[in-house]
Amino acid sequence: MILEFLALTFGLHILLVNLAIGLSTVIPLMKRAGERGNKELILIARKLMKFYAATYGLGGVLGTAFTVFLLSFYPGFIGLAGNIAFVPFALSILLICLHFISIVIYWYGWDKLSPETHFLAGVAMMTSAILIPLGFRAIFGFLNAPVGLELQPKIHLDTLKALSNPTFLTLYPKSIFASYTLTFFLLSAVFAKKEISLKFAKYGLVTLSITALLGIAYAETLRTIAPYKFANALGFLFGIQAKYNVGWLFALKMLFVTIQFVAIAYFLKSKRAIFAEIAGVSASISVVAGELLNAFSQYPMLIANVSGIPANVATQLENILNMAKPNPLTTMNSLYAITLAFLVPLLACFAFLVYMIAKD
Amino acid sequence: MNWASYPAFGDRVLSMIGIEVHWIILQYILGLPLLAVIAEIIWLKTRDERWLKVAKTIAKGFIMVFAVGAAMGTAAEFGLVLLWPNLTEIAGKYIYFPLYAEIFAFMMEVVFIYMYYYGWEKLPEKAHVVVGLLALTGAWFSATMIVSVNCYMQAPTGILLGSYAKGYPKLTLYVPSTIVSALNVTTLQLAGMDVLGKAGNSVIVAMPSKIVKVIVADAVAGKTVSHSVLWKVLTPAAKTKLANVTVMAILDAIMFDTVRHIGVYTVTFKSPVFAPSVLHAVGSGIVVSAFTVMAFFAYSFYKRGSEHAKLGYKYGAVFSLISIVYQGFVSGHEMGVAVAEWNREKFAAILHGSPPFVEKMELALAGVKNIVSYNQIPLWLRPPTIIHYFYYTKVTLAVLLGLSALVIVYMLFVKKKEFCSPYMLILPVIAQLVSFLGWAVREVGRKPWTIYGIMDVKTAHTINPPPLWVDFLVEAYFIGLLILLCYAVYRFLWKAGEVKA
């Protein structure tokens, strides 16, 4: 059940933060464009902001939930990460604080601040949203291959080297463009009966194409520096033996990427809402499938490639970096029952909140 | 002892500021929903629209600050991971459950606080009140979980106090018999360990903290048994067998066994200071919220003279008086008794330098006859004496707050005079200061320990601390965010004047 809980919280977190990155970009730009004489754009931007102001908190909570689950199930890993990864984590956390305060100012400052000041708050909201994943993606890059890990004079992370990790350099922009694709397709579906929907669909098509190219580049970097992970994720395509085959997740993702291309092409041609809706749902599924593929294709290892770490250190780290060896105090059925007893009704209540806001 | 002389001063100050900014904000999430829901219930009973306006104004206040409070909570959590990773690891391993359960509390807050705010006209009236109560439950549930972890850090379950000369404080541990057979029990007994009994396959021992803290330090440093203090107490046969085993593996075996015997889900709630700590922490949130509501509406009434502001002012005044009386005479008293009994070094440091009559009074209030004097405490166990000043400043300000509330209520309800002044805005600031000082006494007074009797500050600290200038920058950033939030509340709640819920 541990992997399922991690996957559930992480998957939902990713879905909401991808939407957050997209909305944080679209809303201020749309409102700014509307201020040049298009009141409908301002109205749409306000509706979107109301939705975002009411729901962004849960994306953050699920991120915290994921971290606390990791801490409970794999405390040694969090202890190690805390000891070496100050810069990337701190960067992301400080930006989260900035993002939350900018949401407060942007939402409650609507019609109360001058257009310029309000836009400035929007720029802070947009920039912080784009930059928050920078630190977290650097950590993900590190988990692919520990580039920048130095053992002398004591174990620490050379941040600049870590940022030159090729998997990070491709993963970060891919994540941002994937966020935009998801947001554009969902907005295209929500506003399918309005003219603006076509614009969203076209933007989404462009960002989807860029994401696909960056995805290929990311897979190539994995092939060279994290072959174990590559084999688990894509090995079935190249006849490479996988130890923990999650190729089905890759196939699922590719299926829904293809559906997005096809559905949005039909939508642009026929303007029938159902195709935009299919593209929106497919984008959500492919983003979640892609993230789960990325997170779990290195199973059972928390760091996919430890070949660069000296054997004596690797042996020491073996237990704390092994996902198959969780904290023994957490492997009780009663804990899973407690988790489900809370999670299920709370997620249902969240769905009701979203419905209540969306209905408005 | 000088507060700055304990290890990692820069990072301790950074943690203090980060957590305090979170605490300043989150106290409003502990108190304001209570005030809003009660106002709403009164509106339902009386149908007096002024009560609805009071409830909506209070709700707008907490919805605005909640987001930043939550973000600062995340920052505080990551601050713990990044600055005190070894503490985080130990907590995540042995006392993880309240942290785990806090996630559900946090989710409750996020869902129901927003549902409460956005659901005014969309939910049936009674359902809306229920949503408000669920939001409040989420906030108090969250506080209870976090405070329970802090209680374990103040007085871990199984801590035994006694004569320093006999090796106290000691920690009750359940040691698996496989490990006991590898130990030279006589050597350990000479070092102060007491065998208390047996429980299944475990031997219950009282292990001096002096030994526990070294074992924990060796474990987090990644030492193997042959390079640790354990080497001195192993039997010759065990030395050959365990030389290359990590100390962490031994510690894990003992602590897992101990926690299983005490209760995986209940270990932190069994801390002897748990109940008074939770009551006092939640009470603090209510006091700060009540004084803020009173001052906000009083100033609003002073400036605008509106009827709902007058009502809100009276409501806040009554709440302030009741909450500060509760906080001082009920939860504060219980907290004091618990500190005197379970944090005796801290209690001694609080009283250190007090005039004899004050000391006598404190002892009488805490119900103890004798205490250890500060100078009798071994050097390695002494907390910083600065908490003496924190404590008495706190008590003085709290008394002032209580008297202010009493005078205001007297003027409003007995003399029937709507006494108000812009100077009343200082009252919530004093309430925050009192709360901060109380928290500082608790946290600073725990030094030299991070987890009392188990882990010291140096062991908890990261092996890669940030430079001091980074600490300063981050502190300035947090304070800047708090100022920005205050400005946002002033600009969008106060200046907007009317609620547009």
Image (tube, rainbow, N blue to C red):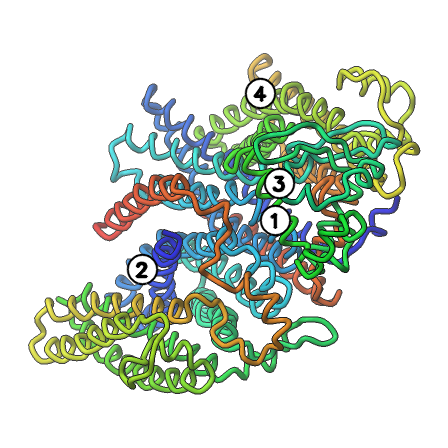
The numbered disc on residue A46 is: 2
Cα–Cα span, label 3 and label 2: 62 Å
Q: Do the residues at pointers 4 and 2 share their chain? A: no
Give the mark toward the camera: 3 or 4: 3
Q: Give x and y (percent) for residue A280.
A: 21, 68
Element type at marker 4? helix
**Residue on which disc 3 sits:** B176
Element type at marker 2? helix
Point out the tag, 1 or 4, that comes first from the N-terminus: 1
Q: Give x and y (percent) for residue B189.
A: 81, 36
Asked whether the residues under the numbered discs 1 and 3 touch, taking CB atoms below 8 Å apart as contact, a structural biologist would say no
Q: Do the residues at pointers 3 and 2 share their chain? A: no
The disc labelled 3 sits on which kind of residue?
A: Pro
The numbered disc on residue B252 is: 1
Q: Mark 3 belongs to which subunit? A: B
Cα–Cα span, label 1 and label 2: 53 Å
Q: Residue at x 85, y 19 (%)?
A: B370
Residue B231 relative to residue A123: left or right:
right
Cα–Cα span, label 4 and label 2: 42 Å
Element type at marker 1? helix
**Residue on which disc 4 sits:** B322
Image quadrant holding the C terminus of chain B, namely: top left
